[in-house]
């Protein structure tokens, strides 16, 4: 294996007794056995040259990989067919809903959809109008999608940085730079961010929050690549992978 899968290519699968970190090509990078005194098994997470990789499957049968690809394709087509709301011209929070959700901003970053896809471009414009307030991004509209939580939420710092990255990847580099620079003005004197930004610009929620800063780093890296005229690192669009895995006539 020449290179390891991206971090976002992995999924954590477990049953509260065993757990495994599995990539979408079927390789396992971490496996925790059921007993507390059993050692965990690590592969590529530790060392690119010596870590190696392994798979769990019946002897001589690569069925685990085939099932993974088939399930990936099923989920992809279900979201593309049912997760996009034609009237809103946007992907929505869940099937049979018309509510926007800022979690969808990571779709192009993880390779689910190409950033220049018209369905994604119209989704991003819908978020501009409904979820963005002077560069700050709300996760969703709680009035349209009641979450049962008391009080009002602020804008999510992580979502704002996701928005910056999505703008940059989607060809709106100037908009991304403006929103990034505005967001940086909300940090503390140490350059730190909480989970949310309140209505008067105060830091709200968990502080400092790692997710906010990881999203900041991702946004900064995407901007750095694109400002230099290079494409930002990204997985191949899932549409391409699904087509490659589809049975040939």
Image: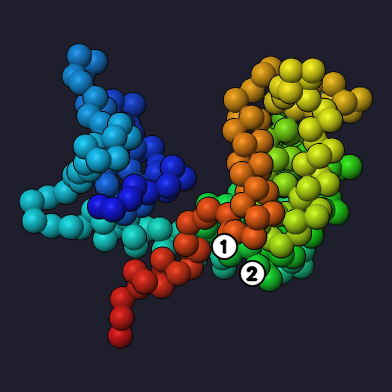
Quarter placement of the C terminus: bottom left
Where is residue 205 shown, x and y percent of the image?
72, 20
Q: Which residue is mark 1?
A: 113
**Image coordinates for residue 45, horizontal then vertical, percent:** 33, 35
* Residue at (70% x, 40% y) in the render: 161
Q: Is residue 62 above or below residue 21?
A: below
Secondary element at image label 2: loop
Q: Is residue 198 visible?
A: yes
In the displayed image of the protein, which residue is found farthest to the top? 37
Identify the coloring: rainbow
User: Quick check: 42 above or below 189?
Assistant: below
User: Label 2: which residue?
Assistant: 117
Q: Residue at x 65, y 55 (%)?
A: 228
What residue do we see at 74% from left, 18% from top? Answer: 190
Residue that extends furthest to the bottom in the rendered view of this protein: 249
Q: Is residue 38 left or right of residue 235?
A: left
């Amino acid at each position: 294996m020449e290179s390891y899968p991206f971090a976002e290519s992995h999924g954590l699968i477990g049953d509260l007794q065993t757990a495994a970190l599995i990539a979408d090509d079927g390789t396992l990078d971490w496996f925790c056995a059921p007993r507390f005194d059993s050692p965990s098994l690590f592969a590529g997470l530790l060392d690119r040259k010596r870590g190696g990789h392994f798979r769990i499957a019946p002897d001589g049968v690569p069925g685990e990989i085939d099932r993974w690809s088939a399930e990936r394709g099923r989920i992809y087509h279900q979201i593309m067919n049912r997760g996009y709301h034609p009237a809103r011209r946007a992907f929505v929070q869940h099937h049979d809903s018309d509510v926007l959700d800022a979690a969808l901003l990571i779709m192009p970053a993880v390779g689910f959809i190409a950033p220049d896809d018209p369905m994604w471009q119209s989704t991003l414009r819908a978020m501009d109008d409904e979820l963005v307030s002077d560069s700050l991004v709300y996760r969703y509209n709680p009035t349209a999608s009641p979450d049962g939580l008391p009080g009002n939420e602020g804008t999510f710092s992580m979502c704002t940085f996701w928005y910056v990255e999505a703008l940059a990847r989607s060809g709106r580099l100037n908009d991304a730079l403006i929103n990034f620079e505005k967001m940086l003005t909300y940090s503390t004197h140490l350059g730190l961010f909480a989970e949310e930004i309140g209505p008067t610009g105060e830091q709200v929620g968990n502080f400092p929050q790692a997710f906010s800063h990881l999203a900041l780093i991702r946004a900064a890296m995407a901007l750095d690549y694109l400002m230099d005229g290079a494409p930002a690192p990204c997985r191949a669009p899932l549409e391409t992978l699904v087509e490659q895995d589809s049975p040939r006539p």
